[in-house]
Amino acid sequence: MTATPTGQVPAQPQEQSSPGARAGAQPSTRPSAQPGSRPGATGTQAIWLLLGAAFVTILNETVMGVALPHLTEDLGISLSAAQWTTTAFMLAMAVVIPTTGYLLQRFTTRQIFTLAMSLFTVGTLLGAVAPTFSLLLFARVVQASGTAMMMPMLMTTIMALIPADSRGRFMGRITIVMAVAPALGPTVSGLILNTFSWRALFWFVLPIAIVMLLIGLVRLPNIGETRKTPLDVLSIPLSAIGFGGLVYGFSTIGSGGRIAEGGIVLAAGVIGLVLFVWRQIVLQRADGALLDLRVFRSRPFALSVSLVTIMMAAMFGTLILLPIYLQNVLGLDPVTTGLTMLPGGLIMGLIAPLVGRLFDRFGPRPLVIPGAMLASAVLWALTQLTEHTSPVLVTLAHVGLSLGLAFMMTPLMTSALGSLKPQLYSHGSATVGAVQQVAGAIGTALFVTVLGMRSASSAAAGASEATASADGIAFAFFLGAILSLFAVVGAWFVRRTPAA
């Protein structure tokens, strides 16, 4: 496959778009690779560029956690206010991701990439020079707006260019981005902050973002063709209220002490999401939905996304609880805590390509079933944490959980998107991205809330602070272990599905 003179990778022949594509909308001609075909040099370059850009942007989602004490001292703000540099990032991603299904069909690949990397670059520059906390917070929102577009664009590009018999290998590389980038964030942040100020977290990334933006402007091809579909303006605020309300509500509840406020926002989010879903069902008949929910008509997609939701909630909850346990119970410093958590993320990223190749050969079930069992077994083992548990055992447990998740994430995402028609790839990718953000917020809120309630109960019974914290963390993992059993059962129903 080679680029046309205009830099656009031509589409492969595919089936007609759905009968609902009318009201002036042009039929989708987004490419669908045929069995036995290969993306060629142009398509491969596009995928590697998008992988690199996604890695850099997602890395920034977790770098600010270690820097919170530095922000409080330098900007004169409270720790709860500083936490908004992470919360606002997640919130902005939850609001923007649902719109990417429409954007990826309406605009060219190069236009979306340029917009995403420009927003990320501008946000990075603003963060580096921000004189006040308000401007820093705004910079993080701008960064997140660009980051939110990268993963759906990467997934859609892979689904469009890679034949069905090779998708697992390439989707495994996406798992590297999803696993290694967040895991490296705290470690990289801690190493930088040992020598430089928190502003260096932005200055180190800025030249990389600029170089990738320039490369994309020159070398990135346009994958497929665009569709002139109408934009439903009402769906945008409904999406923001729905997905943003869920993420913010769960995050507020998870922060502790603000359950009433979080409950009100969560209720507003649920109402907004119900109205958003109703609006999309009405509009999809005229092919005008902002996020086409016909993706859930595919049973493999619905099942895979449900299992991804459970496991992402468990992963994010674990990423919150283990650092709390290592620092508050075992007394480790932030840098040592980051290094203790690093092997799990690296193992998950390193094994993902192998899992992808195994998926291409054997299908999802031989991978998803043992992966779910291993993840569940580790969560049950973590229910035995005490104030005397060795950090080495914690590291081994995190590695085991990461292995289990690695055997699940790539097969589930590939099966989910592979069961869709080509014209729904972009909407499926956006849906997976939105679900991941909401699942992360749910997992964080659920684990932290249970931790707080159980710790308070243990402290009231006379336990020491360390013992109470350990008891609360162990009980939170007990709840996670219960939830993992649903994933174990659901894994047996995952099937290899032919490409739509």
Image (cartoon, grey):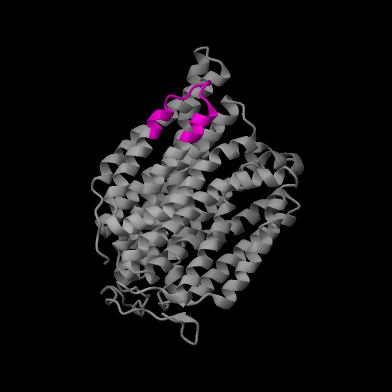
Q: In which quarter of the image is the C terminus?
A: bottom left
Q: Does the stretch in magenta take in 500?
A: no
Say left or right for 220 vs 364: right
Q: Position of residue 132 (x, y in %)?
A: 74, 50
Question: Residue at coordinates 46% horizontally, 82% vertically from top-left?
Answer: 3
Say left or right for 351 vs 361: right
Question: Residue at coordinates 52% horizontally, 12% vertically from top-left?
Answer: 462
Residue 465 in sight in this render: yes
Question: Residue at coordinates 46% horizontally, 69% vertically from top-left?
Answer: 103
Question: Residue at coordinates 35% horizontally, 36% vertically from top-left?
Answer: 376
Q: Check the image and name the residue furthest to the top.
A: 462
Seen in the picture, residue 500 relative to 379 is either above or below; the reply is below
Report which quarter residue 214 is drawn in.
bottom right
Q: Quadrant of the N terminus?
A: bottom left
Q: Does the stretch in magenta take in 384?
A: yes
In front of the other: 174 or 228? 174
Give the residues in magenta: 378-396
Q: Where is residue 71 in the image (x, y as percent from the top left)?
A: 71, 43
In front of the other: 399 or 237? 399
For the image, the number of numbered tags is 0
Q: Position of residue 405 (x, y in %)?
A: 40, 45
In front of the other: 361 or 50? 361
Say left or right for 381 vs 489: right
Residue 437 in sight in this render: no
